[in-house]
Amino acid sequence: MSFRLTQRLRREGVPAERVSAFIERVKPVLGERCSTRFSDLVSYSRDYWPISLHWLLKGEVPSLPDAVVWPESTEEVALVVSAASSLGIPVYPYGGGSGVLGGAVPEMGGVVVDLKRMRSIRLYEEDFIVEAEAGVNGYYLESYLNHRGLTLGQIPQSLYPSTVGGWVATKATGQFSTKYGGIEDMVLGLEVVLPTGEIARFPPHPRSSTGPDLMRLFIGSEGALGIITRVWLRVQPYPEERILQSFVHESFEEALQAVRRVLARGAKPAVVRVYDRIETKRHFYAFEEAYGKVLTIVILEGSSEVVRAEAGILEREMGGKPLGEEPVRHWLRTRFDVREAPEFAPLGVVFDTIEVAAPWSRVVELYHRFKEAVGSVDGVLFVSAHASHFYLQGACLYFTFAGVPRGDPTEFYNRVWDAAMRATLECGGAISHHHGIGRQRRPWLRDALGGGYAVLARVKAALDPRGVMNPGWGA
Amino acid sequence: MPGRWSWLLEEVGLRKLIFSPLVYRYIMGELRGASDLVKCALCPNMCRHACPVSIVDGRETTSPSGKARLGMLVERGYVDLDRDVAEAIYACLSCEACRRWCYFSFSVDELLRPLRGRSIEEGKAPRGVQALLSNLSEHGYPYGEPRSQARPSGGGVVYFPGCVTTEHLPELAESALRLLELLGFNAQPLEGVCCGAPAYYAGDERLFKRLAARLAEALESAEPRLVVASCPSCVHALRNLYPSLGLRVPPRVLHVAELLAEQQQFPGKGTSLRITYHDPCKLVYALGKPNLLRELLVRLGVSVVDPRRRGDETFCCGYGGTLPFSHRELADSIARERLGELKEAAETVVTACPACKLAFTRNGGRVLDVAELAVSLLGGERGG
């Protein structure tokens, strides 16, 4: 086998004899499900970190692992982790690889554990609970539930490629989150293989008060504290009725205030998305009445009586100009369209999306300061945003930037991220709303967590004394 | 009305865009941009959920975009086209479910076919594929010497069972001929001549053309007014692929299910049997008939139980394309996965493709072809 790929990040390797010892330990159980073939190694060298698209086009990958394994049970995951841990070999869990921050990149070499062979589902219909192994595909789970008159309500843009384990590990959320919540609101129980290879199980309950909620430690831990192998999620009846509405406002601020009023009256739309002027033009150019203004789309769903009451609140509180169902239908048709990334990266355009959150009192300020900070980086073509997840306390701002750097694309990318993260921290915002930390956000994690960073470091040291789980994450 | 890129011109401004000439030329339609393979390679696998190989195999390596990425790296000279890489790019059912979900309308199968051709030329194709191509080249039949070489003559109706039927399911061919008789057609079989589709999916374009020309010639000498086939892949080849090669095909080529759907009424006996169905990928995606089988079953008076994945969200049986030749174990795993899902709906499964019937039967399923079901229901009385 020969290749001419360059590894962009890998700083240190794992000695070959340790990799061999690891393979000797797991091969008798996993057989062909343990691979060191180059085609597999290169396939697991990256996730969907946008800057890595530019690297890939030049024959560069973030980092090659030394082996890839595909366990089919929690016990097999435990075997892999325990073998790797005893040999001091890094371990990286891998789901759908759709993370956008390099969280699944095997930075230090070692073993990638792909969970996609663990995909059993069990439904406890009376209890409205579904048990899913970590590798269950997102769309697969949702369509399984829909066929039985149920929904999870977790519809991220990565629904098609991502996995349940990935959702929990990154603390993901979906497009319908304003009603259904983020994945953390849906997880009732969890099974995790700890960095030492032991299996910890937190069984599902409607609620429990049995000490601190340890299960939550693992939600959003991105593989640094263990490998999530199974989750129990709450499910809901499939909505009886769905109402689609859209509104045009003159300004972003005005539209945000309107949504705040709706939420304060107790309505819980499933989807609310407020697009700023640029994004309204970009996504809804066919709607003349919205062009150059600010469009808000809303989906109400659930029991008919509740939805109709919510529609009444919407009608009274939204203000602006109602634009009917069609813009929402357009969004439903195009919401999984990610063509711009594959179209523009080969043209040298560096782009990314950055999602942050702030309370109502700071959200408009954050919007303006973020745009100003990122827009002033040399080479940036535009910065735009929509607000896409709402809470009674505030909202998520989902920014997009694109630029054509004169020099090194990675340097440009990091300058933009630095401007974005600083502006967010200065406004008291959360530096990530749902994409997580991965490798791209680690320089700002300490500032974002403040005193909490020491807690994270101590928890990590206690659970993973040899530092084998996703090394480099958050460091 | 503003166009797709009006916002960019307005918000970024012409002056800034002119300093980004590639972007400017692209949005002005003067530049095609990256190749389709590169675009597919840079996608986060937005069709993964629909790809049976990806779901069952679970490997990034054989995921739709994963295969395109390897293909792109090979094309750009960063990775060699060795046996491992070839193994990955052949891990495909050619079902084209990916196209259904792709905003670019790409088919990963189509994008990778040239590289499959290259792996054949360089002797890197999987051994099972090499054996298949060698049989096709030598005997014009995927399995070696054909069992039957029936040739029709003198106009009329030709029944084309396809190689899977002839080799593995001769009883299906008998039922199809009986059905044609019940419907008032005196059909003659044409057997032992492959339509060339396996060579096409394997990436051997030259061999496909040779086989296609041979079948087109056999049909031309039979001069049929109608060709009825049991395999949707054969219908797709004859109806859609042959004309692109400039070959003459008979005026009407129909799948058995299409012919049945044309009947005005079914004076059959009906059945209280609870049946579920499996929509073959080629019938759904290549022939564009996602609801045909279900509608037919309802008209035949069957108590139909819908499976979870159906119509334009069907899930290939595992025996599509050349997968059973290149990756037999994976093909059977996919068949078992799909069969398990169908069994959630009902024990008896009806399908409309011999490859699907073979895949499920080999893996413990009770499966009827729609022709077999129709014969048992129509029971000797003629349809109108």
Image (cartoon, helix red, strand yellow):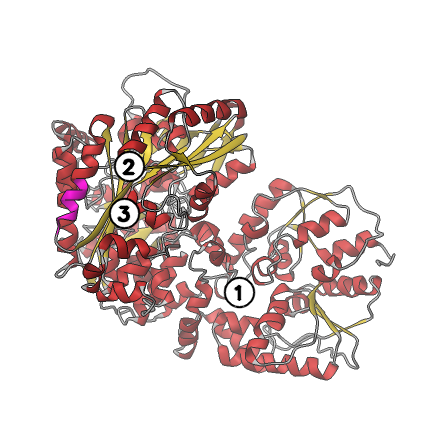
Does residue B309 show up? yes
Callouts 1 and 2 on one subunit: no
Residue at the image position 75 percent from the left and 49 percent from the top: B299
In the shown orientation, is residue A271 left or right of residue B372?
Answer: left
Q: Which of labels 1 and 3 is toward the front?
A: 3
In the rendered image, which residue does mark 1 sit on?
Answer: B321
Q: What x and y, as percent, mark residue A448? A: 15, 33
Residue at the image position 59 percent from the left and 59 percent from the top: B288
In the rendered image, which residue does mark 3 sit on?
Answer: A100
- Local packing at callout 1 (Cα closer than 10 Å; few below 14, some 14-19, many 20+) is many
Residue B343 lies in quadrant: top right
Dominant secondary structure of the residues highlighted in magenta in the image: helix
Residues rendered magenta in the picture: A370-377
Q: Closer to the camera, A354 or B304?
A: A354
**In the picture, which quadrant includes the C terminus of chain A?**
top left
Residue at the image position 31 percent from the left and 44 percent from the top: A80
Q: What x and y, as percent, mark residue B290? A: 61, 54
Q: Closer to the camera, A304 or B116?
A: A304
Q: Which of labels 1 and 2 is toward the front?
A: 2
Q: Chain of mark 3?
A: A
